[in-house]
Amino acid sequence: MALDPSMPILVVDDYQTMVRIIRNLLKQLGFENVDDASDGQAAIAKMRDKQYGLVISDWNMEPMTGFELLQRVREEDGLSATPFIMVTAESRTENVVAAKKAGVNNYIVKPFNAQTLRSKIESVCAI
């Protein structure tokens, strides 16, 4: 499965260390076009300015959670089709179910490696 290394990706996490980790993993996978946002509001603003091929968002953020961000993205006309991967430290079934109902494309539980990230991206961005 070929992944497009020029595909723009938005990483959303309020924890800068996690943004760096995900950015480095994406770089290992060959992705160079990576932006980041430290909260849901900033992510929505960036998504209105630029079309992303994928959003990778943490679940636990303040003031807008990743789940709320997902809901907002799915409700907004120009953004609703954007592939969305949720990252979380918890694998609680009710969270997974809620995210699936809200339209998440895939789910990654921390910690994860480049191979896991690659397979999740391939599953949602199949060319």
Image (cartoon, helix red, strand yellow):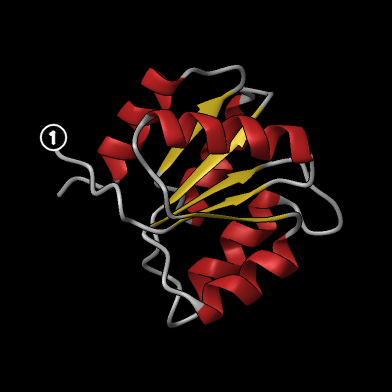
Residue pictured at 44% horizontal, 82% vertical: 77
Would residue 119 be found to the left or right of residue 84 on screen? left
Quadrant for the N terminus, please. Answer: top left
Residue 6 placement (x, y as % from top left): 31, 55
In terms of depth relative to the viewer, which is nearer, 64 or 94?
Answer: 64
In terms of depth relative to the viewer, which is nearer, 29 or 64?
Answer: 29
Residue pictured at 55% horizontal, 41% vertical: 86
Q: Residues within 10 Å of mark 1 (few under 14, many from 20)?
A: few
Would residue 48 be found to the left or right of residue 20 on screen? left
From the viewer's perspective, is residue 2 above or below residue 115? below
Would residue 81 be found to the left or right of residue 68 on screen? left
Residue pictured at 85% horizontal, 52% vertical: 62
In terms of depth relative to the viewer, which is nearer, 19 or 97?
Answer: 19
List the residue tagged with mark 1: 1
Residue 102 placement (x, y as % from top left): 51, 55
Q: Amino acid at mark 1?
A: Met
Would residue 92 be found to the left or right of residue 56 on screen? right
In terms of depth relative to the viewer, which is nearer, 72 or 16?
Answer: 16
From the viewer's perspective, is residue 90 above or below residue 40? above
Q: Secondary structure at mark 1?
A: loop
Residue 47 placement (x, y as % from top left): 54, 72
Residue pictured at 70% horizontal, 46% vertical: 13
Residue 97 placement (x, y as % from top left): 52, 38
Count how many numbered circles sit on residues in the image. Answer: 1
